[in-house]
Amino acid sequence: MTDRRPGVLSPWLTTLDHRDIGRYYLLFGALSGVWGGTDALAVRTELLSPAVDLWPPGTYDAFFTTHGVTMLFFFATPVAFGFANYLVPLLIGADDMAFPRVNATAFWLLPPALVLARAGTVGHLLGVGWLAPPATGWTMYPPLSVEGPGLGFDFLLLGLHLAGVSTILSAVNLIVTIVMERESVTWATLDIYSWSMLTTAGLVLFAFPVLGSTLLMLLLDRHVGTVFFATDGGGPILFQHLFWFFGHPEVYILILPAMGLISHILPRFAGRRLFGFRYVVYSTLAIGVLSFGVWAHHMFTTGIDPRLQASFMAVSLAIAVPSAVKTFNWITTLWNGRVRLTAPMLFCLAAVSLFVLGGVTGVFLASIPVDLVLHGTAFVVGHFHLLLVGTITTALFAASYYWFPLIVGRWYDPGLARAHFWLTAVGTVLAFCPLLVAGALGLPRRMATYPADFAVWHTIATVGAYIIATGQLLWLLNVVTAVRNGELVENCPVPRSIDHEWRTRDDTSRD
């Protein structure tokens, strides 16, 4: 299905073509990422000094909340499903997604969801008093989330619920497409990226309904008088169990597509096939299963039964094994390969390197005694940002450059792409590695104020954040320039281009 459907609105708004929908997801995710990134810069700028001297009371907490929500639900997830929308039907030989109308509906739920989620913060900045900003953090823990006044948080809950419905629809569509729409592609010959997205979609089906139910219960507690999360009955602990049953699989919902992209792209520029393809698939499935058995490692400090703590620690340590299998296979694929340091390959190498660093720090946090010391510190912030920014985002950038000629039909500027890479890689290390050190020394997280002894670490981290932001400006410049004036891609049919090696000006080692 390739035609745009005419309708009351412009055919661009009524299209059912999976490639159009994929482009819309990517554009929406990019714009949301810019918006969420400005929240991060606002937070980091405040943290340049130990005192609260930049934003009015409550504004820091609002930026802190909407940054996490925007980047997780409206940037990383839509971009991951955007690539899946565009690429999976081409990879498996399908004409389109199994349910094109459901596919379009899933996307068009996202813009109003984003508006609802951010309405409170925007209203606060504009001085709308009755629209109090959400200031609970992205985890929304009660009793603060139950007792907090204002409609801004209610709008946030409704926006997240709508985004969850969108993601579930996309996951169902993706599963049916891969299972039922394959043409001349067997399970044995299914590509690694499609395997990763199939596993991701399965995780969504089990995780996101739990989040949606939890958000509805929270809304009922706030406005109807129910006591699902009442403090007297242990409600805050119940909320944490429900939230993290979704929250930790959500990490793998984000990182499995990134791993699939790395596994697909890296071999193209290493001059070799992916080493141990079958075991990479097995490790993907293992991560999908184990991801639902680790949620309570976020709750080691809450006083839950030590026997439960020990079991969750064991599974949390065990899930590092399939992740290590992938890392070993990526490194072995590179070994003795003819590596070509194009922009996609540079971002893949950065993603692998930062995944090792972020993953190792996660193993420390999976240990109960270590987590009891580091849980409330900036060490945790450094750890998960090395994964979310250092691995997931860099892998998405690798894919954006690798398939840019296919999706846009024009070439990007390789010089700007390399500058983008170096600014992103160096900025990521500067922004988050100091937080590991400062957290180990006791720097608390989530707070706008902190002891003056830690000012130097926050200064370094803020400089790193601005370097990252500069790199993303170069990426936006590269994309806009290429779309308007880039060299046209000639004679590149889809069956060949989907796995094409893109031997272009970007290939620094071409004979």
Image (spheres, helix red, strand yellow):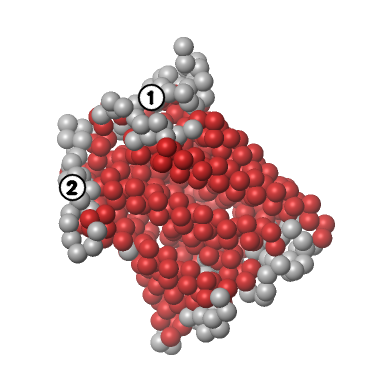
Spatial separation of the CA atoms under disc 1 and disc 2: 29 Å
Q: Is residue 422 left or right of residue 336?
A: right
Q: Which residue is mark 2?
A: 3
Q: Tell me which amino acid carries mark 2.
A: Asp
Where residue 418 appears, as percent x and y from the top left, is 55, 32
Q: Nearer the viewer, residue 366 or 42?
A: 42
Sequence order check, earlier mark of 1 and 2? 2
Q: Residue furthest top?
A: 511
Q: Check contact, mark 1 vs mark 2: CB within 8 A.
A: no
Is residue 237 among what the camera can see? no
- Element at label 1: loop
Residue drawn at (44%, 58%) of the image: 73
Q: Nearer the viewer, residue 315 or 435?
A: 435
Q: Which mark, by number, is residue 501?
A: 1
Where residue 75 appears, as percent x and y from the top left, is 45, 54
Residue drawn at (27%, 35%) of the image: 91
Residue drawn at (63%, 61%) of the image: 42
Where residue 439 appears, as percent x and y from the top left, is 71, 53
Q: Is residue 428 above or below residue 45?
A: above
- Element at label 2: loop
Q: Residue furthest front?
A: 485
Q: Tell me which amino acid carries mark 1.
A: Glu
Is residue 506 among what the camera can see? yes
Q: Which of label 1 and label 2 is nearer to you?
A: 2
**In which image quadrant can residue 245 be found?**
bottom left
